[in-house]
């Protein structure tokens, strides 16, 4: 799925639509995340976290297949909606499953798990970028998810079957602490900045440097590469400092990379800027969800379900908003909403640190 975001300008060119219509694919992903978040605690109660993750993978494959084979905007938007439901379900339950499995080592495990994800994002971006420069449809690059899913199932899925006994009290429900919701808003802004960069940076690079769409999409591989490096090694950055300190550090680094990208007029400089922005973005999701789990009051599955809602709002709103603004003001000016998202996320971490939970407990 990693190559889909950078390929939005390619999809827009194929279908001959406006930026706002192309951005609706991001909106569909966001709405899918909302649906997955609303269902998550019930699905986990019935199947357990591990099987729920596999259910998500299966739904994702279904949506990806129809995205590749169908052509009109209504069809591709609908296909991405189903793919997004599965993707959100798989991500949420992978995080909670690994967090429970690794205990005190979960920050490092989750960071490196997301690092592997970014490595495959690089593969997706390269594949789609290379196909875009040929007579072969770039959408066929998404079919790479099928053999990888098959390999995962044959090497692990068939043998790893953890026991799951549904809680007699039913799925997790009820209110979450007030600090959780402040942190939740911060996650919306963090994910909003990430997906604005993912979906529209290729268009910004094309506008600033004048290179062709295929090369601009290929240059986007620097962002997931930065994400991989940041997630794999980010667990070792200031390990003795608080989760809030580390999140603020990565937000600042993301802002630096973005400002360099926004001002760049050379393809090589844009690539380096995307790499820096990717490193800065890399740890934000895992650190933000770590904050949500700490604020959850013991309702981790419910908290991650609502985290999918936060992701849904951000993914649905951010690319569409940026695309709509770009139709009116141009992509360069439209991109100025991204540092506003970053600053808002930073302000919320400052206003609601994790230590506020400790004060409330006392």
Image (cartoon, helix red, strand yellow):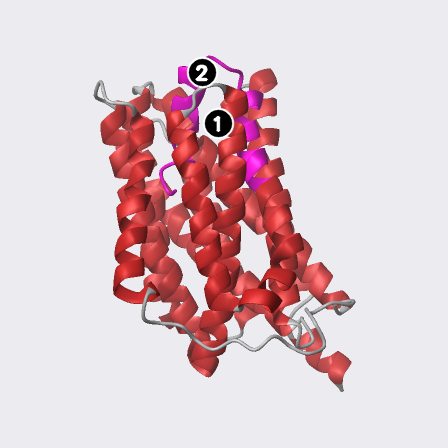
- Vertical placement of residue 76 versus 276, above or below: above
Distance in Å between CA atoms under marks 2 and 1: 10 Å
The residue lying toward the viewer, choosing from 112 and 68, is 68
- 103 to the left or right of 151: right
Q: Is residue 16 magenta?
A: yes
Residue drawn at (58%, 43%), measured in percent from left and top? 32
Quadrant (top left, top right, bottom left, bottom right) of the N terminus: top left
Residue 45 visible at all: yes
Magenta: main secondary structure equals helix
Residue 57 percent location from the top left of the image: 43, 52
Residue at the spot x=66%, y=72% of the render?
299
Residue holding disc 1 = 76
Residue 270 spot, x, y in % from top left: 34, 35
Q: Position of residue 156 (x, y in %)?
A: 30, 66
In the rendered view, does 10 fall on the left or right side of 192? left
Q: Position of residue 10 (x, y in %)?
A: 38, 23
């Amino acid at each position: 799925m990693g190559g889909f975001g950078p390929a939005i300008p390619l999809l827009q060119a194929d279908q001959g639509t406006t930026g706002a219509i192309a951005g609706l694919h991001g909106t569909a992903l966001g709405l899918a995340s909302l649906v997955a978040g609303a269902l998550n605690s019930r699905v986990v109660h019935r199947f357990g976290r591990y099987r729920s993750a596999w259910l998500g993978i299966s739904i994702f494959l279904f949506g990806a297949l129809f995205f590749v084979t169908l052509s009109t905007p209504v069809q591709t938007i609908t296909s991405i909606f189903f793919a997004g439901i599965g993707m959100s379900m798989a991500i949420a339950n992978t995080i909670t499953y690994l967090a429970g499995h690794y205990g005190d080592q979960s920050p490092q495990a989750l960071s490196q798990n997301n690092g592997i994800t970014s490595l495959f994002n690089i593969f997706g971006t390269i594949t789609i970028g290379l196909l875009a420069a040929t007579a072969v449809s770039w959408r066929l690059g998404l079919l790479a998810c099928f053999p990888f899913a098959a390999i995962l199932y044959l090497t692990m899925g068939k043998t790893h079957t953890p026991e799951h006994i549904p809680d007699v009290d039913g799925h997790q429900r009820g209110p979450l602490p007030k600090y959780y919701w402040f942190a939740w808003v911060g996650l919306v802004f963090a994910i909003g900045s990430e997906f604005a960069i993912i979906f529209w940076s290729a268009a910004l690079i094309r506008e600033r440097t004048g290179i062709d769409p295929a090369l601009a999409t290929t240059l986007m591989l620097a962002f997931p590469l930065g994400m991989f490096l940041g997630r794999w090694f980010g667990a070792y950055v200031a390990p003795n400092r608080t989760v809030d300190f580390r999140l603020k550090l990565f937000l600042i680094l993301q802002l630096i990379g973005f400002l360099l990208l926004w001002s760049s007029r050379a393809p090589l400089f844009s690539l380096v800027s995307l790499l820096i922005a990717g490193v800065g973005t890399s740890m934000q999701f895992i650190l933000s969800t770590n904050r949500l789990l700490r604020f959850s009051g013991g309702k981790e599955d419910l908290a991650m379900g609502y985290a999918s809602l936060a992701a849904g709002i951000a993914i649905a709103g951010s690319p569409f908003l940026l695309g709509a603004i770009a139709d009116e003001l141009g992509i360069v000016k439209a991109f100025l909403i991204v540092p506003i998202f970053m600053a808002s996320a930073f302000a919320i971490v400052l206003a609601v640190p994790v230590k506020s939970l400790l004060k409330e407990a006392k």
